[in-house]
Amino acid sequence: MSKSHVITLGGMEMIPDLSGAVIVPESRTLLIADLHLEQGTSLARRGVHVPPFDTETSLALLANVIQHTAPQRLIFLGDSFHDGEGSIRLEDSHRKKLRSITEKIETFWISGNHDPEPPEDVGGLHAAQIMLGRITLRHEPAQLRGEECEISGHLHPGCSLVQRGRSLRGKCFAYDGKRLIMPAFGAYTGALSVTSRAYWNLFEEKAAEALMIGTAALHRFPFSRLS
């Protein structure tokens, strides 16, 4: 677990992790966005054949994060499955792994655009959105009013820049003090640059920064430095 950066949102300190998760120490809550389980089998049904190991890889990473953070609450911020039938296609071993988690940890599944309905037979509770203190947890970013704060996923943020003659590129956390958009956790998920049109008007320009996920640490850059 990387503790090189601590951010504050809605009066709460939280730790973005190298895995793409967020730890909220005050409430011992672990946040995961865009797990996209069964993406491989979903692509295969459309004729795009990729190695069918995304669910195994993603669940192994999830188990590792849980082991090192020991959360009391686990909240998935939507698109936990790549489509509405993803939980039905789970292998029995993968279903057992998920149930072993939800039986020990209070778990919530927030609706995503890929999986709007509750997953089947994996345990946990389902919600459209959840309040964590003053922070709204939801899948897709919304326009904020006044002092509202939000944590979301959906956009799979990434960033790139040139530093000391080297081109750096990777998934990232996008943050401005009122809003945090988390990177996609899934093994096969890509990233959409925070400089793209989808992010326009979501962040306060002067406060916006990216925490890029590196090999051994998170690297913090203002949006103004990104290419």
Image (cartoon, rainbow, N blue to C red):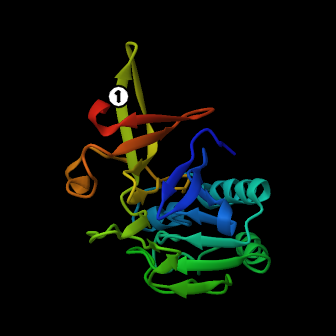
Q: Secondary structure at mark 1?
A: strand
Left or right: residue 175 versus residue 143 is: right
Front one among 123 and 108? 108
Which residue is rendered at x = 37% and y = 39% of the image? 159
Residue 95 is drawn in which quadrant? bottom right
The C terminus: image quadrant = top left
Q: Position of residue 131 (x, y in %)?
A: 49, 78
Q: Nearer the viewer, residue 143 or 164?
A: 143
Q: Quadrant of the N terminus?
A: top right
Residue at position x 44%, y 62% in the image: 43
In which image quadrant can residue 129 be found?
bottom left
Left or right of residue 199, residue 186 in this image: right
x and y percentages locating residue 182 in the rendered image: 46, 56
Measured along the vertical axis of the image, is residue 41 above or below residue 68?
below
For mark 1, what is the residue? 161
Q: Which residue: 52% across, 50% down?
A: 7
Q: Is residue 10 left or right of residue 3?
A: left
Residue at 37%, 75% (x, y): give it. 113
